[in-house]
Amino acid sequence: MSQVAYLPAGKREQTKVQNRQAILDAAREVFGELGYEGATVRDIIRRTGLAAGTFYNYYRSKEEVFAALADDGARRFAPILKALRGKGGALDTFVRDAIRAYFEFMADEHISWAARRPAGEMQPHVHGETPEMAAVFAEVKDAIENAINEGRGPISDPEYMAAACIGIAREVCDKMLMRRPIDVGAAADFASEMILHGLKGLPGAKC
Amino acid sequence: MSQVAYLPAGKREQTKVQNRQAILDAAREVFGELGYEGATVRDIIRRTGLAAGTFYNYYRSKEEVFAALADDGARRFAPILKALRGKGGALDTFVRDAIRAYFEFMADEHISWAARRPAGEMQPHVHGETPEMAAVFAEVKDAIENAINEGRGPISDPEYMAAACIGIAREVCDKMLMRRPIDVGAAADFASEMILHGLKGLPGAKC
Amino acid sequence: MSQVAYLPAGKREQTKVQNRQAILDAAREVFGELGYEGATVRDIIRRTGLAAGTFYNYYRSKEEVFAALADDGARRFAPILKALRGKGGALDTFVRDAIRAYFEFMADEHISWAARRPAGEMQPHVHGETPEMAAVFAEVKDAIENAINEGRGPISDPEYMAAACIGIAREVCDKMLMRRPIDVGAAADFASEMILHGLKGLPGAKC
Amino acid sequence: MSQVAYLPAGKREQTKVQNRQAILDAAREVFGELGYEGATVRDIIRRTGLAAGTFYNYYRSKEEVFAALADDGARRFAPILKALRGKGGALDTFVRDAIRAYFEFMADEHISWAARRPAGEMQPHVHGETPEMAAVFAEVKDAIENAINEGRGPISDPEYMAAACIGIAREVCDKMLMRRPIDVGAAADFASEMILHGLKGLPGAKC
DNA sequence: AATGAATGAGAGTTCATTCAT
DNA sequence: TATGAATGAACTCTCATTCAT
């Protein structure tokens, strides 16, 4: 068309990006606080100060913004994990590296929304996990399952083994995030040790 | 005037107890299928055949019936755990016993609602855990934390230790419940071994 | 179940019927004033004084209440037409009878909602025809088409013939309904004559 | 300052006229496909490739563009009718000419949007009549009413007479537009005959 | 105590229209 | 003047809860 005017290059474009981010940030918070079901689109946009309809200029539904959040987390974490997998060492090393990477990512992620949460007030039925975290968690789970299936570890029940690793990682990480200061190194070491040697392998145990 | 004297204790009381139980049963199913947020009071009451308003003669809200369900599970599981705690043996033994008791309870609980679920169809954002399970989980968690704090185990970070045990128990139990047939013994053994000795302690590992 | 109490027999049942009717009446008015697309469920329930949600206790959607209205009209008019069809006389007679029946029905129907309409204020894009009217119109159309196809009239283009009859009936009826007093006899006679003999057959024409 | 002197009359003006026409064309299609209520400004503007806001540089509302469309049709048809009226012959002739002109206009108009409609898919509650058609219809109606009031026909009820003519014209025309090929001559002849002599005047009737 | 219709707040979503660019 | 994101009122529909019966 001949009437090319006001190509989006300046402030318009900028606020668009800002709004998209604002919605994403608000959604992260709201999902973290209220859980997926508990969160409403209105909760999200209210926190941005934007109008109700504006949400739908960026995402078509609650589902979609949730997916975008999860994607975002996965996308940022994927390369880290991939590098680890590429190294292809012993399960021993892989577990330590993967757990550490996971814990570090979670800690980073955490501060962006945990800070402004009314501390101590843990709603019922809510997991306090952002979609990003969930996505990253899924990645790690996948990696561990693969590692075990590839036979880089003892031959027991692979599914149970992965489940156990995952369980430790998730729960210890959760605890870590509740402490101040957050000590990623200590928590990751603990979890790795626990995964590899169990309670009896911990310092102070009589093996 | 409303209390009719000498009303035989039967019919009326009977009905009340039955209705209360019917609601509880329906709620267990519905929460299991739809999750807490997804479940509606209508879903619950519809399954009982009672009228909508009747729900509120027994529970003041969805929240309350959920709590009642959790209480119920906890109340039934508490004595089992208590007996274990009373035995006061080594952490070793306690872990095995507690895990086994937990897994057995879960398996029992499970069949009461898992049966009629459309298998394979796992909704997003739904955890498939009844309130009872959640409550029992909390009990076990408590027991393990206590055991560790009492010094019946290695002196490391007690909170992390409990978290790790809990994580293993939860995840392995979940996997167990998805298999057919459900082999409680194997799963409990695996989880206990994992808790005590980690991956390296599993058969086939070079320690 | 044993707890049979307060069977719907008295006032409850009564208001239910009243509400259903109130919604139907309101819907008739609103569709008449605003047209199908223009009408909203809110418009309808607002006019009844009932709460928003109450609408959905009676009809699942705007579509459904519209269909109910149309059904109602058709159901009431069907027997009249059927009797006419049964008589099986000449097209001549059939046309006069059918037109008369149609005009009479419309006149009856009309007063129930036309009365409270802001007179003279004819919105654009709106046909001022209730679903009942539309339904009855469809019935008559069908009857005329059948009569013509059965060869009870001249052999020309049956579809066009029916269309022409229908056109006359609809338009003349509309005009009739706008006059005061409504003279069904005169209007029906006119329409019949016009259908049968055209302008040239009208009094005052030189044939 | 904003009006640059000596700006060649071309580009700018050209664009304005083109845009106005593009919106009108799009609106014609959309109203034809979706009906007035069903059509949205977004539907219209999307089809032009212009931006949402641009619509409002040309028309203040959906209502206004609709009116413009109607005007357009009326403006194009008016001279045709006027010529007919000027001839001032018998009602007989006038009816035939007017009907023919009307049918021809409708057929022309029709192809411009009917072509790209998903055939056979007739939405409920939608009339498939462009605003232009409505306007032209109104013109013809007016002409016939005038002719009758001027006493160029039988002295019966003029309003009813006009209504009857209009009804025939509208319905037969509708049918004509649904046939393939569209035979304007036959349809116009039929309608004229029907208007003038009724069913009994049709070939095959015993008069 | 049981009933189930009524309630109305609030959910997700659409859309005509405005306005900074 | 063209743009298209922002706006916010209004829409359909759901649901926890109340209350007359």
Image (cartoon, coloured by chain):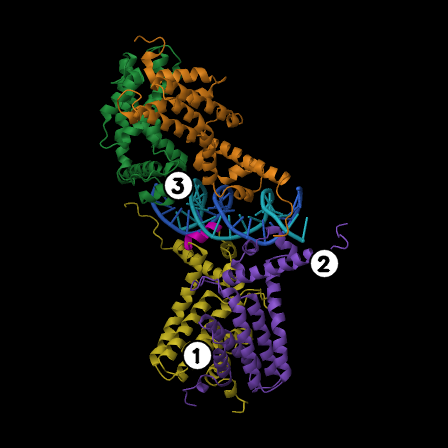
Chain colours: A yellow, B purple, C orange, D green, E cyan, F blue
Q: Nearer the viewer, mark 2 or mark 1?
A: 2
Q: Nearer the viewer, mark 1 or mark 3?
A: 1
Residue A98 x/y as whole percent: 42, 78
> Mark 2 — on which chain does it sit?
B
Q: Is residue D100 visible?
A: no
Can you tell which quarter of the image residue B10 is in?
A: bottom right
Q: Is residue D156 left or right of residue A25?
A: left
- Disc 3 target residue: D40
Magenta stretch in the rendered image: A52-59
Magenta stretch, main secondary structure, is helix
Badge 2 and badge 1 both on one subunit: no
Q: Are marks 1 and 3 in contact (CB under 8 Å)?
A: no
Residue placed at 50% from the left, 61% from the top? B33
Cα–Cα gap, marks 3 and 2: 67 Å
Q: Is residue C101 above or below residue A14?
A: above
Q: Which mark is residue B9?
A: 2
Cα–Cα gap, marks 2 and 1: 55 Å
- The amino acid marked with disc number 2 is Ala
Residue A190 x/y as whole percent: 50, 82
Residue placed at 33% from the left, 48% from the top? A5
Q: Secondary structure at mark 3?
A: loop
Cα–Cα gap, marks 1 and 3: 58 Å
Q: Is residue D190 left or right of residue F20?
A: left
Can you tell which quarter of the image residue B80 is in?
A: bottom right
- The amino acid marked with disc number 3 is Thr
- The amino acid marked with disc number 1 is Met
- Disc 1 target residue: A161
Q: Are marks 3 and 2 in contact (CB under 8 Å)?
A: no
